[in-house]
Image (tube, grey):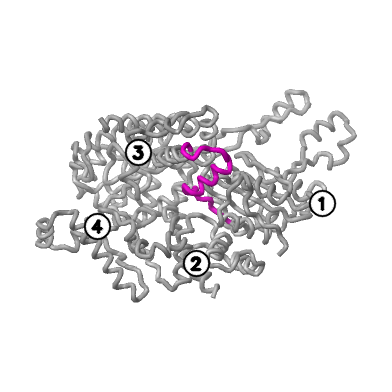
Amino acid sequence: MSNPRFTGTERYVATGDLTMAVNAAVTLGRPLLIKGEPGTGKTQLAEEIARSLARPLYEWHVKSTTKAQQGLYEYDAVSRLRDSQLGDERVREIANYIVKGRLWEAFECDEQPVLLIDEIDKADIEFPNDLLRELDRMEFYVYETQQLVRARHRPIIVITSNNEKELPDAFLRRCFFHYIRFPDAATMEQIVAVHFPGLKQELLKEALEAFYRLRDVPGLKKKPSTSELLDWLKLLLAEDIPPEALRAADGKAVIPPLYGALLKNEQDVHLFEQLLFMNRRAGR
Amino acid sequence: MLVRFFMMLREAGVPVSLGEYLALLEALKARVAGTSVEDFYVLARTVLVKDERHYDRYDRVFAEHFRGLEAAFTGPDATALPEEWLRKLAELTLGPEERAKIEAMGGLEKLMEALRERLREQEGRHQGGNRWIGTAGRSPFGAYGYNPEGVRIGQDASRQRSAVKVWDRREFRNLDDTLELGTRNIKLALRRLRRFAREGAAEELDLGGTIDATARNAGWLDLKLVPERHNAIKVLLFLDVGGSMDDHVRVCEELFTAARSEFKHLEYYYFHNFVYETVWKDNHRRHAERIPLVEVMRTYGPDYRLVFVGDATMGPYEILQAGGSIEHWNEEPGSAWLERLRQAYPRHAWLNPEPEERWEYVPSIGVCRRLLEGRMYPLTLAGIDRATRALNAR
């Protein structure tokens, strides 16, 4: 096949199985469903595919109120009604009130685009079912203008989900699937190296240790993930924190400086402080 | 060859269909993967498996099909052997004299060593037949049977660490949790709990309101919108995983599966026999990751409905006395914690898998019912129905 292959970019470290999944989806023209812990780079993947294959990217961010129809097109009946009351000439042409959705735009693109359907699990439970034909045949029908819209080039579709809802079987059958696991320490070092090329080895080591120690704290509501680690490192660099500040002299966990970047709710911070307190007492 | 692989996946409960099988063949034809087994493993997983909870099953089938190994679907895992399992195995396999002998030999530590040794030997013996240990069905690890993961004996990874393949590491073990059998009736019974409420953005046309407003506006169109209706019920589920619950694992799993798909806001915690100051979310790490009950009460507001699932069969002292827990020293009796939960969640119920006619013969159930002021219901369809009514009452 002459298809271009995705191998990760200079800004994005893709593991072997992830690139395989992407290439399989690109080659066979199937949508790729991506799941994984929040902050493991699911959304970014689509951007990086578009960048590495030099394709235009269309993003469709799904919210709890999003309807499948909105991705195709919307018929703005309300403004047509108002225009009719004002006697506007535009009112005779129904096409004036058809607003194109992201999917339509992607279908009309001159070269094969990348389409990201972000956080599909946020939408109503019927949402994926309403997109079956569109994803399968890459076409849909506009009832108002009796027009069939068909994709000029089958877009590369990346769909992300955070597992908040189960997706219907019929939908899953049409997708390829990949679960991004939380990176191990070695992969994490690669990822950090990609984002902060000049980072001092010592600081990186200490920071990663502190980070994985924090992830091991039981009962955290939201474990810090890759994106939080990167934010935190950025802060550490900006504040010029020395590596020694991260290390505990007696082997016990110290509260990491600027921990607000890692822990995202007050219960977790509270829990962490409690643990530290108990640790200190036990150590005495 | 792949047809057998496909059929085996289906048998193991990975929902694969013909379409996916054809897609895999198509992908192979298009030379997406290289020629290595690892490439094929990743490619087939991408194409065939659509849920990370099935990754573990896929790994087992893959190992079985491509190396002729017989998967031990129910045996325990020698590499992650829980301490208690060994302890219980000791009680089971060793007579009193032997135990005395071991005491003399140097106590429990030595005993554990000996048992581990034994298990290793056992594996060696069966290795010739290409089989894994299949001690399935033995009750010692039944206590963990409720945990979706179960406990299994696999191959000892250390013996051949150099050659451990991805699918042998089975890193997705924790994610397998499904059981879809006869849950439909339970779902229907639970459906009674649904409460629809309008919340969120106003986006549905309020027809009555629009007509009314337009009429008041002397015919000039005035659109009115209302928010859509959503199921707003919130449920907090406390599940007993104690030893006496072994007989009820199946029905509890059914209830759990049904509840999970029925409620958007469902939080669950495990306890052993009775609620004390801590509960946990992951049975495998129950000793490492305990969550204080106070924190649970602080996190979830009184609008949650609290449902206990447990057989309440234990010594009455486990409920009523400080230090009564069989697992640890509890400063306060379980009854105090139950009372606190009852205060925090006025709408609560206890589902008991023991048949109702047996309740009066078990003293601890009586105690528990008194504490709950009668809000205990049998874990049957009719019982769930009664419980949902009680939960809905204001």
Residues beneath discs 3 and 2 located on the same chain? yes
Of the two numbered discs 3 and 4 on the same chain, state the one appearing first in sequence.
4
Q: Which amino acid lies under the numbered mark 4 shown in the image of this protein?
A: Leu
Mark 1 residue element: strand
Q: Residues within 10 Å of mark 1 (few under 14, many from 20)?
A: few
Residues beneath discs 1 and 3 located on the same chain? no
Left or right: B132 in relation to B263:
left
**A37 and A231: which is toward the camera:** A231
The total number of labels drawn is 4
Residue B333 among magenta residues:
no
Residue identified by numbered label 3: B291
The span from disc 2 to disc 1 (Cα, nearest Å) is 43 Å
Magenta stretch: give its range. A177-203
Q: Are marks 3 and 2 in contact (CB under 8 Å)?
A: no
Q: Which mark is residue A147?
A: 1
Which x, y percent locates residue A62?
63, 42
Q: Residues within 10 Å of mark 2 (few under 14, many from 20)?
A: many
